[in-house]
Image: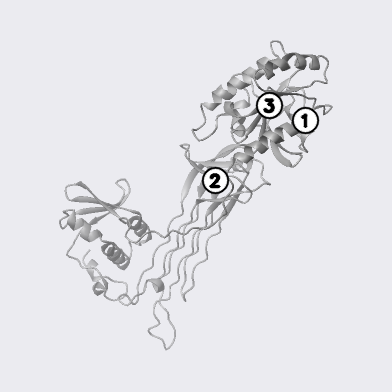
Amino acid sequence: MAAGAQFVDRVVLHIAAGNGGHGCASVHREKFKPLGGPDGGNGGRGGDVILQVDNGTASLLDYHRRPHRRAGNGKPGQGSHRNGADGDDVVLPVPDGTVVLTPGGEVLADLVGEGTRFVVAQGGRGGLGNAALASTKRKAPGFALLGEEGEQHDIVLELKSVADVALVGFPSAGKSSLIAALSAARPKIADYPFTTLTPNLGVVAAGDVTFTVADVPGLIEGASEGRGLGLEFLRHIERSSTLVHVLDCATMEPGRDPVSDFEVIEAELRAYDRELGDDIRPLSDRPRLVVLNKIDVPDGRELADLVRPEFEGRGLRVFEVSAATHEGLRELSFAMAEMVAAHRATLPAPEPTRLVIRPEPVGGGADFTVRTLGDNTYLIGGDKPRRWLRQTDFNNDEAVGYLADRLARLGVEQALAEAGAEPGATVMIGTEDDAVVFDWAPEITTGGEGQGPRGTDRRLEGR
């Protein structure tokens, strides 16, 4: 969703990784070397699409303007054992605190910390050339494998600000002025509602504690139901450990006072809690402070003194401040630092980063499945059979024979027989909606003995 002309914190991104290059089928030809042998190179790998946290990126605006991103394709292999070049990766910089989701809302990654990377779409593998396919039984393959297609996804990027303290309150309560007085941030400030159209971040140092403060755009009654601007930015409070209510003691609007403003904002926070997952601490359950702002304005200090006992009676710490004259800001900053330090002390110590390699167990699971669809009709599923289909050039008889060899070595022939398949059975590989269909002929043997001259396969004669 866009907020203002230059800030976007939620986009739908259409990404496509690069396709792998095709392998090359070539035979070495040189004078006085009539049996040069196969020399086709492998295709290059397709480029990946990678998201990487970059502190120099403030919003997702660039992806709102250009939502389609694609990595480079791998180059095809060539003769003389020349492999194709890999496709170029596309590295997309995102702000710290970006969450990657599926269109259905499933979280794929939570990117926090400068340099954090996530491969959101992997490039396709390059196809093997005929030099790599040569064996003692197939000395001169007349085919090569095709490159695989890269992954394509639609993803949702959602920005949640990474801040220790969130300033919440009505529009024009003085949040922007307060964050400007506490830190080096310089947000836009004016005396009309909805001046702040983007969350502002500031860094505050109080004693030995340094923390970040987020100035969240103003909330109003009904924000959790979509009124005003607040709903667009409530997500930016989710990561904050401490909430600070900034209450206007100099408002001239009828029917408003610091106590009623506080209760309205609390109600909106509780309403938003219902949208949070079970693994996120409710906003209404987080430590909070109350800031009575604008005590430099006539009658502002008197109102602050009047309502202060009401908040203290609720067990809240109250600070009377003036963002304009900086009165009370030192005490406030140290109170916020104390609460942030207390929260950080409860966090588990970070474990050292280590790379753990866990090879998949040999024979630990079936590489394919056989499912009976009807009368003498069977569906073969599994990653390997589907991947091998994508690598096969069905215009080349020898390539089709090589696919039959691979499926037989995998155990598909035996599994079909055990499932009750009879000669002439319809065998589908893939999914019911997208499959390659074969007529099963179990009497055809597989292996190198079926090979004839280069580029032919006797098992396919008369096909």
Q: Position of residue 251 (x, y in %)?
A: 75, 16
Quadrant for residue 4, please give it. Answer: top right
Q: Considering depth in this image, is 32 or 146 the residue closer to the camera?
A: 146
> Which label's residue is closer to the chain start, 3 or 2?
2
Q: How crowded is mark 2: few (under 14 residues within 10 Å), some or many (20 or more)?
A: few
Q: Considering depth in this image, is 342 or 459 the residue closer to the camera?
A: 342
Quadrant for residue 397, please give it. Answer: bottom left
Residue type (three-letter) at the residue carrying disc 2: His
Label 1 to label 2: alpha-carbon separation: 49 Å
Mark 1 = which residue? 331
Residue type (three-letter) at the residue carrying disc 3: Leu
Mark 3 and mark 2 in contact? Answer it, CB < 8 Å. no
Identified at 77% across, 16% down, the residue is 305
Label 3 to label 2: alpha-carbon separation: 44 Å
Label 3 to label 1: alpha-carbon separation: 12 Å
Viewport quadrant of the N terminus = top right
Mark 1 and mark 2 in contact? Answer it, CB < 8 Å. no
Q: Residue 289 carries which label?
A: 3
Q: Return the residue found at the far top.
A: 254
Q: Where is residue 264 in the image (x, y as percent from the top left)?
A: 62, 18
> Which label's residue is closer to the chain start, 1 or 2?
2
Query: Colour scheme in the image?
Result: one colour
Is residue 7 among what the camera can see? Answer: no
Disc 3 is placed on an element classified as strand
Disc 1 is placed on an element classified as helix
Q: Position of residue 372 (x, y in %)?
A: 21, 48
Mark 2 = which residue? 68
